[in-house]
Image: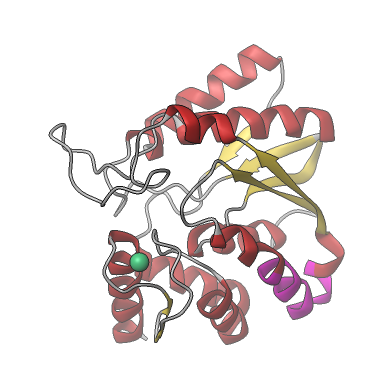
Amino acid sequence: MSDDTALVLFSGGQDSATCLAWALDRYSRVETMGFDYGQRHRVELECRAALRDGMAAQKPEWAARLGEDHMLPLAALGEISETSLTREVSIQMETGGLPNTFVPGRNIIFLTFAAALAFRRGLKHIVTGVCETDYSGYPDCRDDTIKALQVALNLGMEKRFVLHTPLMWLDKAETWKLAENLGGKPLIDLILEESHSCYLGDRKHRHPWGYGCGTCPACDLRAKGWAAYCEAV
Ligand code: ZN
């Protein structure tokens, strides 16, 4: 496995778009991977091509580094999970303190499939946009979960994968700042216009912070982060 290769878990959201730019800035070959698990906001998957093309158009070296895209159907995950991301139920907090947007095991499953693909493709660095700072309380986004998973994957596959989480300790405003540092205003504009966060899949309403219903938890987080970023610059 070349030390200069990476696989980015790329959903089409703000976080994974920023992670793709982060990887394109560092590694000479970068491939992307997305998952279709029957999410209600499947529209995010349609944003992926525009983001990839947009980043390739911004810097010649990014275009040269950007490799294949892989889309994996994971309908089974949607079928066995009872959540508001995969069923027509309203978003709310559950008694255990987790929102019902939590898809149990999602990131563990994603990273396990990513490692299996990285194994075959010879990609050493695996990049994911999970974040512990202003996450929704998802336990599989925690730093300890990812570190434990890296150990398990490396033992179980007899490899030396490195799981990277560039956003782990950033809030949403700092994530915008990271995008600015990586690609300036053109990258900010691209992520604003083409990335998708809204849980309800709303691409009709355009706000200063991008498209979305404006009221779901993902829109709320994105709007607040954009406002804090604008205040800081
Ligand atoms: Zn929304």
Q: Is residue 187 left or right of residue 216?
A: right
Which residue is found at the position 32% from the left and 71% from the top? Answer: 225
What residue is at 38 percent from the left and 44 percent from the top?
87
User: Magenta segment, principal secondary structure?
Assistant: helix
What residue do we see at 61% from left, 58% from top? 45
Magenta segment includes 148:
no
Instruction: Identify the image's colour scheme: rainbow, by chain, secondary structure or one colour.
Output: secondary structure
| Drawn side of residue 85 relative to residue 36, left or right | left
Q: How many marks?
A: 0
Residue 71 picture location, percent across and down: 71, 46
Q: Picture quarter containing residue 86? A: top left
- Which x, y percent locates residue 214? 31, 74
Q: Quadrant of ligand 1?
A: bottom left
Above or below residue 14? Residue 90 is above
Q: Image quadrant for the N terminus?
A: top right
Q: Which residues are magenta?
A: 50-62
